[in-house]
Image: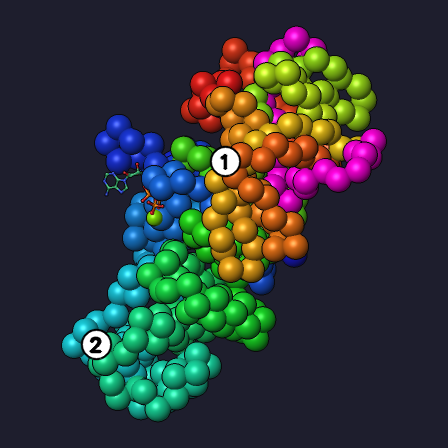
Amino acid sequence: MGAMIELVDVVKRYGDVVACNRLNLAVDQGELVTLLGASGCGKTTALRCITGSLRPDGGRIIIDGRDVTDVPTHKRNIGVVFQNFALFPHLTVVDNVGYPLRVRGVRSAERRERAIEALRLVRLDGLGGRFPRELSGGQQQRVGLARAIVYEPTVILFDEPLSNLDAKLRLEMREEIASLKDRLGFTSIYVTHDQEEALSLSDRIAVMKDGVVHQVGRPTEIYGAPKTAFVAEFLGNPNRLTGVCVERTEDQVVVEADGQRIAAIAESDTPKVGERAVVYVRPESVRIRNGTASADESTLRATVVRSAFLGDSTEYILSLSDSVSWHLRLEHTTRLTVGEAVDLSALRAGCRAFALGESADDGTHRGASAEA
Ligand SMILES: Nc1ncnc2c1ncn2[C@@H]1O[C@H](COP(=O)(O)OP(=O)(O)OP(=O)(O)O)[C@@H](O)[C@H]1O
Ligand SMILES: [Mg+2]
């Protein structure tokens, strides 16, 4: 079975800005792939090339085996859910949901019937007669969802659909999208800034930077085995230590910074002895050491700088040196006081090292070295 959505070397420029720079991505049938990346990296541009509202300057868009690069939007059979809901204020909910059917020439009675069914699917039965302004934000986005599924598109694109909703509604709608996808089996590309949303909802995540995809993989792969410093830095809010590689064996590298040593798993960009290196440490791989550290842990000295009560846990800011602070979440069974000196244990499996070569090609590297 081939890919349902394929972007092949897609290029899109706005004047001097290259928003998509030979973007490649393949999404399988029934899959949900998230585009994750900083503001301005080209996510919306990529989606608009897929819907057809933008014509790429180069490359091809293939949907279900058909090259649609030159096919007009309304003939592409793609549903879209937008961040700002994008409902027509002067149309009732039923007419909003039925709108894509109208564009496709479906007759009024059938439009209504199918719109009501779509509203039932998103659990808005009975609200069809209202206007958008008479709905809450969450309900408006459900209308947006109903409008996207009403003509049973094979592909649905989501552009930050939940970012205008409050935290509780976001969780609820996330659940709703996952369950709709299970029931209807559509293929989707989903854009979000929210890592947790991306990790929880996606079959795979594509991490984007400057108009290209850096790494694509299952959430556990992207999170646990980032291939570049950029990906490591972007996901999971890791702690960071920048120093010099002092030891390298088959299964680990040791990096020394400010008199502290940390062992990390070495991967593709493995630093050599004597080379500058950055180590990214997953916060959940760090604990307060009590007793002796095991062979697969490094011990680091730190001082508690600040604490923030988060309800179910407390987050501590710990200083490892003048220029390096880490954050650590602890359940209330462990309490630290500001000013207290602690020994931290960092599990090697949660630490990734990357070389900070001369060829460092992005701000991530410069930022990391500036911190050392
Ligand atoms: N119509 C336009 N004219 C000129 N430049 C544009 C236009 N639309 C987008 N850009 C630029 O193209 C780049 C990519 O924009 P895009 O909207 O695709 O980013 P994005 O990843 O969706 O960002 P965000 O997360 O902020 O929505 C940005 O540098 C942006 O300023
Ligand atoms: Mg965008």
Quarter where residue 93 is shown: bottom left
Residue nearer the viewer, 135 or 11: 135
Identify the residue at image location x=29%, y=83%. 94
Whole-angstrom CA distance, mark 2 to mark 1, is 47 Å
Q: Is residue 228 above or below residue 206?
A: above
Answer above or below: position of 167 versus 50: below
Instruction: Give the extent of the magenta segment.
Output: 272-295
Please name the residue that numbered disc 1 is placed on.
305
Q: Is residue 60 left or right of residue 82?
A: right
- Label 2 sits on a secondary structure element that is helix
Q: Nearer the viewer, mark 2 or mark 1?
A: 1
Give the image location of residue 211, x and y in percent.
41, 36
Examine the structure image and report whether residue 282 is included in the region drawn in magenta. yes
Front-lying residue, 262 or 276: 262
Q: Residues within 10 Å of mark 1 (few under 14, many from 20)?
A: some
Mark 2 sits on what residue?
Answer: 133
Does label 2 or label 1 sit earlier along the sequence? 2
Does residue 82 lie above or below 15 as drawn?
A: below
Residue 7 in the image: state x and y as whole percent. 48, 45
In this rendering, would 87 be left or right of 20? left
The three-letter amino acid code for the residue at tag 2 is Arg
- Residue under the image location 79 percent in, 37 percent down: 291
Q: Viewed as shown, does residue 109 lie left or right of 29? A: left
Residue at the (25%, 70%) spot, across then down = 87
Magenta-colored stretch includes residue 211:
no
